[in-house]
Amino acid sequence: MEHSNKHPKDNSNTKTSSGKSSFGDKFYDSYLKHYKILVVIPFIILLLALCQLGFQYATAHDFVNKGIALKGGVSMTVERIDSFTALSLQKEIASSFPSNEVNVRELASLGKLNGFIIESDLTSLEDRDKLVSVVEGLFPSLGSNDYSVEVTGPSIGQQLFRQAQIGLLIAFISMGIVVWFSYKTPFPVFGIILAAASNMLITLAIFNLTGEKLTAAGVAAFLMVLGYSVDTDILLASRLLKRADAPFKQRLLSAIKTSFLMTATTAAAVMAALIFTNSDTIRQIMFILTIGLVVDVFITYLQNANLLRIYLEKKGEVTVK
Amino acid sequence: MSFTHKTKKLFTRWRFIFLAIMLLFALLLISPHPWREGVAISGVTQGSPAFAAGIFVSEKGVSPINREVIHFVNSVEIKSVADYYAAISNVNINDSVFIETSKSSYALTATEKDLGIRVTQAPKSNIRMGLDLQGGTRILLEPENKISNDDFTTLQENIERRLNLFGLSDIRVSIINDQPVGGNPQYLLVEIAGVGIEEVETLISRQGKFEAKIANQSVFLGSDIKSVSSDARAGAGVDSRTCGAASQGGYSCQFHFPITLSLEAAQNQANITKNLDIITENSQRYLSQKLDLYLDDQLTDSLSIGADLKGRALTDIQISGGGSGATLDDAIANAVANMKELQTVLKTGGLPSKLDIVRADTISASLGDSFIGNSFFVGLMIFVSITAVIYLRYRSWKITLPMVFLSFAEVVLLFGFAALVGWNIDLAAIAGIIVLLGSGIDHLVIIIDEIQSGESKHESWVARIKSAFTIILIAYFTTVVAMLPLLFAGAGILKGFALTTIAGVTLGIIVTRPAYGAIAEVLHNDN
């Protein structure tokens, strides 16, 4: 039969056909053996993340570093470099606005500098006009078609942020309901919600630590992190809870392989975009998603998988030798 | 089984046929024309030479591909926006200009230097591009006072009319309601493609409360104006005789145009003027008080009233104003711009409330162009990377290629849907598509893995597919639910991301996943 030749390798047995254990098998065995310790690690990390968020809130009165679109201010994107660096441009512009915050970032793709993003907390339209004329003065070849300006009043940015938080809460609750109807047992629902929440909070903490400022696009990215982190947890729960026909070890391994592949494909798309895009909006979205994906791998295998195992063992449905 | 046999078998599966039909349909909707050149007419200013020659842009409902495209100006071929502006820069006053478009030919007489046609690069497909990609202006307005729902509709119509009169038709004025359920609308979002913010800012946000007074007594309001003329033959325009050097340097010019009042307003004016005295100034006889014109509570003009108008109900009045600039040309251009703005505001009437600009974005077209090009490149890189990852796992092209093909088919379907619905694709939407490419394939992975693991347990095909689809459906609902808040949050700034994600996964559930099931079936059931 041509069947077995075309069949991809199926190493659901921990021993290869030659009878010797490979490194991968040893790793898996070790993972299975130390599950009680491993399950604690994500909780510790979650705790650390909560500390970071708490600290952030105490010092900056916000859970996350907010960018212009959320705080209010002006953002100007200029497709020119002339002889400036981000720092030198920032100094020049800041000297015209001594009582305001001025920040200049690089607009780059694939390591090549394409221009600058100038941000400031000026909010009136007159101030914006002044900023535009200052920048036009610094870049003599700049035509009105070569730059973009975005002004956001402070109230609308705050509204977006507040609404995103409410939206997040609603998303969590609705997800809980959907999962509840699918599995009808409380523990998996709890496990999935915990995993999704941990994923989001840890991603947020890491984002804060990188020093990046959250834009409106970043808010979308966080909601997306929520969306797909649940995918891998749902797969895990389905495989482990519904099919009691193979030994647990086997089911877990196959579930891990599938969900790892799922994460890998999404990561491939996201990282390709992160590396090759020239848009700052897309870059921040992909950056947050990348962090979220890496954290997801962590959470799914260390926390969710092991929690489900503990639950199943307690129920007596599973014993792993 | 041979390849051709398998392919034939594939086409007997209705799920695959469904996909094929949908893809064809999507491609028709998208209507790609990658080699198209020329500039599309995006707006015609009223009263301009183009307007007089019969060129117009139909209000709504024309798909991008069917827009009128200029191909020749005075027999010079026009391929780009730069070409068009180069061609018309050589036009002098009273020249004849012959314009050939995809629909017809027009003969214009250049009564003014600005022919009044707004152009953008001719669209290469039916996909509407958002401001991020096309360049333009986006302004979010909030009324200073609380106004009713009806007032909001009036506001929307009024601003649309103002922009249309000004020659801008590629616009979108939407009422934004922040709360998903109930609540009153709060904002007005104005999006105009291809236009810089300076042009429209004052036009839009100006309340346009017009009032004429004599000695602080109200004579007539904006609502009493029955008609406003922009016709040069009726005397509307900049009077070059009034142009001269201004005292602070530079030049200034005056404009005037006639308006017609209602009979009641004219009678009211007569009642007031009949009580005024006559004075003599520069050997001319005038009434002792002037007619003061106020726009948004600011005095814009004071007109002397001729003595013979005392007690007479006059319905025709001349409104005048001015403009200044560093050079004579600048002064004339400025005066013309101010005149057009005032005419537009008077024609459309005052807005129900003063408006605050809470967000104003100007996006450059060249930046937008570079994003479009880059997006294609990123798409290619994503294709390479996901193919690599999938192949590394399954080591089989039979499995890899259909999966990658279907991921991209999903994106084509999504674009087809966007073309059908008239969606604007912006950067947030593109981000949504990138994520869709990566996560869409996740569901296909679930299908393949369920099939394979079910195989080793000798499960029936139906059972395997069923368990795969159960997982997929749960994942689908959670994704949709996570995206819903983005549809409303922050006055819809992230709507593009949410819509593409929701539409994308929905199309996936309906079309591509089942098709993949069919493909997998054919490929694996060799027996």
Image (cartoon, coloured by chain):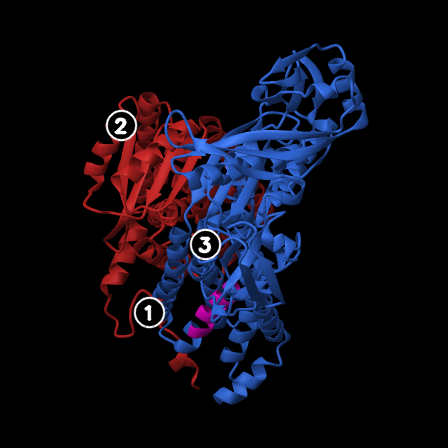
Residue B516, image x, y percentages: 53, 70
- 1 or 3: tag closer to the N-terminus: 1
Residue B430: assigned label? 3
Residue A195, image x, y percentages: 42, 42
Tell me which chain the residue with mark 2 is part of: A
Chain identity for the colour blue used in the image: B
Tell me which chain the residue with mark 1 is part of: B
Report the side of B448 relative to A298 (left or right).
right
Q: Secondary structure at mark 2?
A: loop
To which residue does mark 1 refer? B392
Please determine if labels 2 and 3 lie on a single subunit: no
Residue A261 seen in the figure:
no
The crowding category of the residue bearing disc 3, from other C-alpha atoms within 10 Å (few below 14, some 14 to 19, many at least 20), is: many
For the residues carrying marks 2 and 3, which lies nearer the camera in this image? 2
For the residues marked 2 and 3, what is the alpha-carbon distance in whole angstroms?
36 Å
Of the chain colours in the picture, the one used for chain A is red
To which residue does mark 2 refer? A96
Q: Is residue B78 above or below residue B190?
A: below
Disc 1, disc 3: CB below 8 Å? no
